[in-house]
Image (cartoon, rainbow, N blue to C red):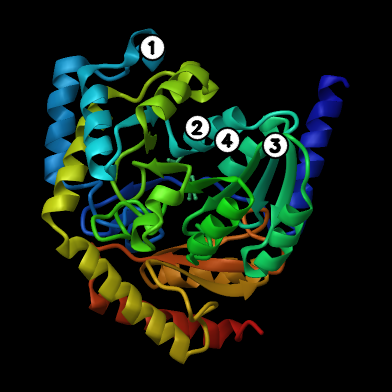
Amino acid sequence: MSSSEFSDWIEDDLQKLRKEGLFRTRRTFKPLPNGRCLLEGQELINLSSNDYLNLAHDPRLISAAASALQEMGVGARASALVSGRTEWHARLEQRLADFEGTEAAILFPSGYAANLGVVSAIAGEGDTIYCDRLNHASLIDGCRLAGAAFRVYRHDRLEKLKRELDKKTGEGKTIIVTDSIFSMDGTWAPLVELCDLAEQHHAYLVVDEAHGTGVWGETGRGLAEELNVESRVTIRIGTLSKGLGAMGGFVAGSDSLINWLWNRVRTQIYSTALPPAICAAACESLLIIKAEPERKQHLHQLSVFLRQELAHRSLLADVTSSGPIIPVILENPERTMSIAADLQAAGFLVGAIRPPTVPHGTSRLRISVTSAHQRDDLERFLKALDCSLARYGESR
Ligand SMILES: *Cc1c(COP(=O)(O)O)cnc(C)c1O
């Protein structure tokens, strides 16, 4: 392929994305405290953030990070395995283990790296991985990379998964992989039923708590804690980038599991460790989560309110779920973009989510509430949404 053929190919693909309404532009925005942000000079209420507990801008995190920055500089300079693991990394791993009630914990450069690395390390040729259709891309990519047989299931049709597990024979490991809370739907994985299935079929269960950490469970350990199945989950993966307002991924577990991951997971071995200042900030988050449970309570009150209001309007996709991730499914990508633009003009930033992030025909607004918001913000948001829907028509 000549270089002009290559540019033609790129242009053709861009054209295709534009025609399908799937072209994504890059914007620059500035986060502000209190759940606001600045976009092209306009101040917006940010309903697109995963900073559920409003920690990313907390002065205590900033000052913990600032003093670690002064002390150790910016970058970690090497992978954790070589010489990038500072005392801040060690302290955060210890705090995470204490928080999760496990012997040990291990950090990863991101949640994506944790999922990709862990799933691809635990499975290989001869093994079979069962992966939920709605799982995050990082888990799906981990399954693809593993080299194991890879089957997709739907958690709303668990009897099919059960039949497949019943039929399965052979020596290899069986691994079930799931998000705890599905990131674009806000719905819960049926963790109790998955634990039952895993135990009945001698399968291992891997759960990604990206949207569970800090938000669910008595002490904020996630959905597995909320549903009282922590000890039945083989590997629990979490992120520091969402409810904890920082950056990075982690696994908490037994000493031997953590030692094994340290030695075997390529995204741990071959990537530079997190900046020490980020670890200092995340240590602070863990203290705040413990000391200030009212953040979580406020978050849940707001989520209940917004869900009720959307349900009254028949806009709530799943009336049985709860929590701060709330999709409004508009089906068509162009309408989704138009309504998101209307909302932005009215002062609200919401995620407009299109394929391939979600299946075709399910483009949506992904509203995420955080504890920074107030009921009044959401009331005004609902008014703006009503207005825009009246303009562009109801979806179905
Ligand atoms: C965001 C997300 C990740 C990736 O975490 P990062 O820390 O952003 O890399 C993994 N799993 C799920 C379900 C997510 O939503």
Q: Is mark 4 on a helix, strand or loop?
A: helix
Q: Is mark 3 on a helix, strand or loop?
A: helix
Mark with earlier residue (4, 1): 1
Which residue is tagged 3?
144
Q: In the image, what residue occupies the spot 77% across and 36% down?
A: 10
Q: Which amino acid does label 4 sit on?
A: Val
**Ligand 1 lies under 8 Å from the Cβ of mark 2:** yes
Mark with earlier residue (3, 4): 4
Indicate left or right for 313 with 84 as reference: right
Q: Which amino acid does label 3 sit on?
A: Arg
Q: What residue type is labelled 2?
A: Ala
Mark with earlier residue (1, 2): 1
Q: In the image, what residue occupies the spot 52% across and 59% down?
A: 182
Mark with earlier residue (1, 3): 1
| Spot occupied by residue 79 in the image (x, y as percentages of width and height) | 41, 15
Indicate left or right for 178 with 18 as reference: left
On residue 272, the disc is: none
Residue 137 vertical placement versus 187 (above, below): above
Circles 1, 3 touching at the beta carbon (< 8 Å): no
Nearest to the observer: residue 357 or residue 150: 150
Q: Is mark 1 on a helix, strand or loop?
A: loop
Which residue is tagged 4?
119
- Can you tell which of label 1 and label 3 is closer to the viewer? 3
Which residue is tagged 1?
78
